[in-house]
Amino acid sequence: MIKFLGTGDPLGMPVISCKCHYCQIACRNKTRQRLRPSILLQENNVNILFDISPDIRIQLLNANIKGLSRIFVTHAHFDHLYGIVDLFQLNYIKKVRIPIYVNRDTLKFIKKYYPWINLKFIVYKNSKKYKFNGIEVIPLQVEHSKKFTTNGFIIRKEKRKIIYFPDFKNFTNKSSFNLSKKADTAIFDGQYILGKYIKDPEHLGGKNLIKIINKLDARKIFLMGVSEHWYKKTEEEILKYLPKNFIIPRDGLAIRV
Ligand SMILES: [Zn+2]
Ligand SMILES: [Zn+2]
């Protein structure tokens, strides 16, 4: 089972103090709100968290999560990592040390800016298989931030394949692309799926993004980071512009994988 704990862009929905029609809808209707990106894989009594959003406290409470087994972080941008301070408090009080798998740049960032955080960090290697209770996680580097090395993950469970690339500009090589093909479930960067609304060279957007997602030939595609505030369209209106197997998940959605 995959639970979408947060599906929002870096600002989340609604945007603080925004009076636009779409943020007002989200203010009134909780099911239209989006927290920052985190997903949870729950299988065989294992809870694996992918990305530690700054909203992680409320996300874990909302999902009634009793404990985490492993954590994987894609990169050091705030919307994927800054909840680590909350997790540190929790680990400290409960005297547990959940293994946190990060790339080298993310660990460097944590050591520099949160030097007191004493957690169990493991620097993962690209293309290496990490196995727990029948689940396999393979980190793959992708192009995204100039400052921080960024990864995505391939997750395998029996014959099922899930890919998680929440922030994405391109694959770094052909073999990463090939490894990512034909997933049953693709959870992908959708921040600029209808094109760029601000200057942001770190993500792919619009037609080029749709083209590369289509080439991956996944069965179902779940888009992360789509913002009704920026596009001034509802989720339903945005979907009209997209291929049929594209889905805009809401926070709290759980899917069988
Ligand atoms: Zn707004
Ligand atoms: Zn990022």
Image (cartoon, grey):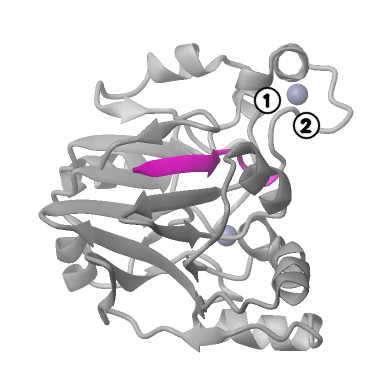
Mark 1 or mark 2: name the one nearer the start of the chain. 2
Residue beneath the point at 48% across and 59% down: 50
Q: Say whether residue 84 is magenta.
A: no
Picture coordinates of residue 155, whole percent (x, y):
28, 60
- Mark 1 in CB contact with mark 2 (< 8 angstroms): yes
Picture coordinates of residue 118, whole percent (x, y):
71, 86
Establish if 148 lies above or below 213: below
Picture coordinates of residue 196, whole percent (x, y):
55, 39
Which one is in front, 92 or 198? Answer: 92
Which one is in front, 28 or 175? Answer: 28
Q: Check disc 2 and report its element: helix, strand or loop.
A: loop
Q: Decide if residue 151 is on the left or right side of residue 54.
A: left
Disc marking residue 13: none
Amino acid type, mark 2: Val
Disc marking residue 229: 1
Disc marking residue 15: 2
Q: On the image, which quarter does residue 45 sit in? A: bottom left
| Image quarter in which the N terminus is found | top left
Point out the residue furthest to the left here.
159
Q: Decide if residue 138 is on the left or right side of residue 238.
A: left
Q: Check disc 1 and report its element: helix, strand or loop.
A: helix
